[in-house]
Image: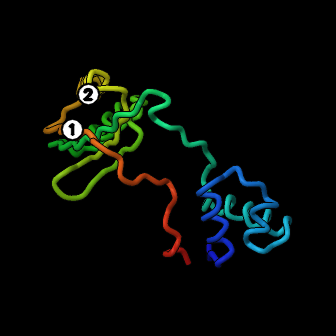
Amino acid sequence: MKLDAIDRKLLELLQQDATLQVAELAAQVHLSTTPCWRRIQRLKEAGVITRQVALVDPRKVNVGVTVFVTVRTSQHTPAWFEHFRATVQAIPEVVEFYRMSGDIDYLLRIVVPDIQAYDGVYKRLTDGTQLHDVSSSFAMEEIKFTTALPLGYAS
């Protein structure tokens, strides 16, 4: 799907505040309400906008500790991966899960209230899963966090 300047501006605005009313969005992109609404619907139908969510302050819900976990495995079979994926998906504290290139096979971002809670997550992660190496790094300070994607590459 080709995105023009108005589409990119709408996406920029919605990434900052998805609760903006269509009339307000329309005014900011210099359209009337109906064409603006149609553009947003088209972006949804095309899968550019995948969902609209509320971002929650992790400290306010007692998961202010972020742990980055790197996993290396000597197993690379589809059956092993399906078991590992199911294990990871069953752990709600894992909020991001990536397959990586390079020396690390998988990277997980985990949120917990404290080290003791992380220990419980670690045990659930490693119980019954054959892993070669698991390394944990605790974030000391959040310097930058955004869910907004850069739109300069969109065409």
Q: What colour scheme governs how the chains and residues are painted in the rendered image of this protein?
A: rainbow
The residue beneath circle 1 is: 136
Residue that appears at 18% across and 42% down: 73
Q: Is residue 36 above or below residue 126?
A: below
Residue 121 disc label: none
Q: Is residue 76 left or right of residue 84?
A: left
Amino acid type, callout 1: Ser
Q: Is residue 115 above or below residue 149?
A: above
Residue that appears at 82% across and 69% down: 35
Q: Are dots 2 and 1 in contact, CB under 8 Å?
A: yes
Q: Locate residue 86, reporting x and y percent.
A: 38, 33
Residue that appears at 18% across and 44% down: 72
Q: Locate residue 85, reporting x and y percent.
A: 35, 38
Q: Is residue 25 left or right of residue 65?
A: right
Amino acid type, callout 2: Tyr
Mark 1 surroundings: few (<14), some (14-19) or many (≥20) residues within 10 A? some
Query: Foreground: 121 or 57?
Result: 57
**For marks 2 and 1 on the same chain, the one whose residue lies earlier in the sequence:** 2
Secondary structure at badge 1 equals: strand
Q: Is residue 139 left or right of residue 92?
A: left
Corner quadrant of residue 131 = top left
Secondary structure at badge 2 equals: helix
Q: Locate residue 55, reporting x and y percent.
A: 55, 43
Residue 122 disc label: 2
Corner quadrant of residue 155 = bottom right
Query: Foreground: 87 or 123?
Result: 123
Q: Is residue 144 left or right of residue 54?
A: left
